[in-house]
Image (cartoon, helix red, strand yellow):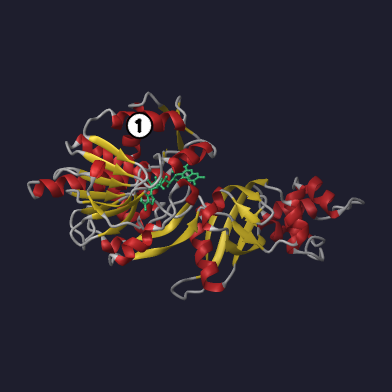
């Protein structure tokens, strides 16, 4: 590496200009808020273009940008960070996000589970229009190929570029560097080292909203080629963290995907925190799947009692209970000898609670999001680093997590609004 060129060439920063580092949705929205507040913005990103993970998100089944849940229920999806998000969601609410989208000529449609999607605009067009709107402002400039590498005590930023090291000394900075999943999009979490060297506590990244590997045998691994198991209810049992014996999380209704390695899908993501905690506590986690959530055990017992069939057991379960061959394969895995499956009383319990043993999460590179990041203890209410006045953080790089359903992007927008407003207030209070 060459010596740092102090704020050289096109990286020069005027004394009033703010820096935004990271051009995902959180960074772009922070930049927009700062510009609206009358501040020049210099946006830096390691990649040649912005919003690469947003593009992936939009291409993976449509851009689920927020959710229609009422605010308190919405905030509860952020787990331990719910009280904080209750305030953040009032700063920039799901309705505010819909109004913002309308500024691009997009309406919204609400799907199952309250998921809200932009209607009438694709993610590529949305990103292009957004970036064009920012670029049309003469106070905005974008510096691609600038990889943030260091933060100095005085707030100076160091970037690795193709020209060598470049430094900048903005009036204030919003970092929005993302998490550590899907590293090919630029969000590789490598910034963690730079913050740790600057004395900022960063919780280790862990995969969130991800698949989990199960103890499938070779038959199931070959049989489950991403097959959906529709209309099931999923629970997780684990020891209480405060030693009150076993507790159960769920049930979460929905569709899970059976894959060669294990399971994934909405209900699994929604139970992700409990699954991870169970695996961390006891090296595996028992997932309990109710194959017939609309029927009780008595109904199953009645359907199986006295059933005489020359058919195979799998045909019996298909004809009497309407179970698919994949559902039956799960029952077989749980009861290889078939003792319970031949006993209507035992079978009626098993169908309501088929155990699947989960061993580990899939690699973080495959996960939709990551847990971990900058600890909220390091930040004040305005999301400014306590040890670094004038340096703010937003988006997935903070230590929060939420399930899929629009909660991730809403969290990025709401934290970005808080951080950028924090910058505006902080600069105003110092008459900068
Ligand atoms: C497959 C998939 C589907 C998804 N679907 C949805 C969905 O439907 N709904 C939803 O709410 N969320 C979804 N998400 C999650 C959502 O995309 C992310 O939560 C969101 O993009 C995070 O925004 P961010 O701005 O915090 O970070 P990112 O979007 O990750 O952006 C971070 C930026 O920082 C840059 N950067 C990183 N390190 C450096 C560095 N050292 N120097 C300079 N720049 C750097 C990166 O290049 C990147 O541009 C999905 C994610 C994936 C992978």
Along the line of sight, the residue nearer the viewer: 371 or 304: 371
Q: Residue at x 37, y 41 (%)?
A: 25
Circle 1 Cα neighbour tier, 10 Å, few/some/many (<14 / 14–19 / ≥20): some
Total residue callouts: 1
Instruction: Please identify the residue farthest to the front as the structure is shown.
Output: 2
Q: Secondary structure at mark 1?
A: helix
Q: Residue furthest bottom?
A: 243
Residue 306, quarter of the rendered image: bottom right
Residue 241: x and y in percent read 45, 71
Quadrant of residue 194 within the rendered picture: bottom left
Give x and y (percent) for residue 228. Answer: 66, 45
- State whether residue 103 is above or below residue 94: above
Residue occupied by mark 1: 130
Q: Is residue 89 visible to the viewer in this orientation of the structure?
A: no
- The residue furthest right is 310
Q: Position of residue 158 (x, y in %)?
A: 28, 55
Can residue 48 be seen in the rendering of this structure? yes
Residue 401 in the image: x percent, y percent? 42, 55
Q: Quadrant of residue 351?
A: bottom right
Q: Is residue 276 left or right of residue 196?
A: right
Residue for point 35% across, 32% down:
131
Mark 1: is the Cβ under 8 angstroms from ligand 1? no
Question: Which quadrant is home to the N terminus?
Answer: bottom left
Write the residue at 43% across / 52% down.
Answer: 402
């Amino acid at each position: 590496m060459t010596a740092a060129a102090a704020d050289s060439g096109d990286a020069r920063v005027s004394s009033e200009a703010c820096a935004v580092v990271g051009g995902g949705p959180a960074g772009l929205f922070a930049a927009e808020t700062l510009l609206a507040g009358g501040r020049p913005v210099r946006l830096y990103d390691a990649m040649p273009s912005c919003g690469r993970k947003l593009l992936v998100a939009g291409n993976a089944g449509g851009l689920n940008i927020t959710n229609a849940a009422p605010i308190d229920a919405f905030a509860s999806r952020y787990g331990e960070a719910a009280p904080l998000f209750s305030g953040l969601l009032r700063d920039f609410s799901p309705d505010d996000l819909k109004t913002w989208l309308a500024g691009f000529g997009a309406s919204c449609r609400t799907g199952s589970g309250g998921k809200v999607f932009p209607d009438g605009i694709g993610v590529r067009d949305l990103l292009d229009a957004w970036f064009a709107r920012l670029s049309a402002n003469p106070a905005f400039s974008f510096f691609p190929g600038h990889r943030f590498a260091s933060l100095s005590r005085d707030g100076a930023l160091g970037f690795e570029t193709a020209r060598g090291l470049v430094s900048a000394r903005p009036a204030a900075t919003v970092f929005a560097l993302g998490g550590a999943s899907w590293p090919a999009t630029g969000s590789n979490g490598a910034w963690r080292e730079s913050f740790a060297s600057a004395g900022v506590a960063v919780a280790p990244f862990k995969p969130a909203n991800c698949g989990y590997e199960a103890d499938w045998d070779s038959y199931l691994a070959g049989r489950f080629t991403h097959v959906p198991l529709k209309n099931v209810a999923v629970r997780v049992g684990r020891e209480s963290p405060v030693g009150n014996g076993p507790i159960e999380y769920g049930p979460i209704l929905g569709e899970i995907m059976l894959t060669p390695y294990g399971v994934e899908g909405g209900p699994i993501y929604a139970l992700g925190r409990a699954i991870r905690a169970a695996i961390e506590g006891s090296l595996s986690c028992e997932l309990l799947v109710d194959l017939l959530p609309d029927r009780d055990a008595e109904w199953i017992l009645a359907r199986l009692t006295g059933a005489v069939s020359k058919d195979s057991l799998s045909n019996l379960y298909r004809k009497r209970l309407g179970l698919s061959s994949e559902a039956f394969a799960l029952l077989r895995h749980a009861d290889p000898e078939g003792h319970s499956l031949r006993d209507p009383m035992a079978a009626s319990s098993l169908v309501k609670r088929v155990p699947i043993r989960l061993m580990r999460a899939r690699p973080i590179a495959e996960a939709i999001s990551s847990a971990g990041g900058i600890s909220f203890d390091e930040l004040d209410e305005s999301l400014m680093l306590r040890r670094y006045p004038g340096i703010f953080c937003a988006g997935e790089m903070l230590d929060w997590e939420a399930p899929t359903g629009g909660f991730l992007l809403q969290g990025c927008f709401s934290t970005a609004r808080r951080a950028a407003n924090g910058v505006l207030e902080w600069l105003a209070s110092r008459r900068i």
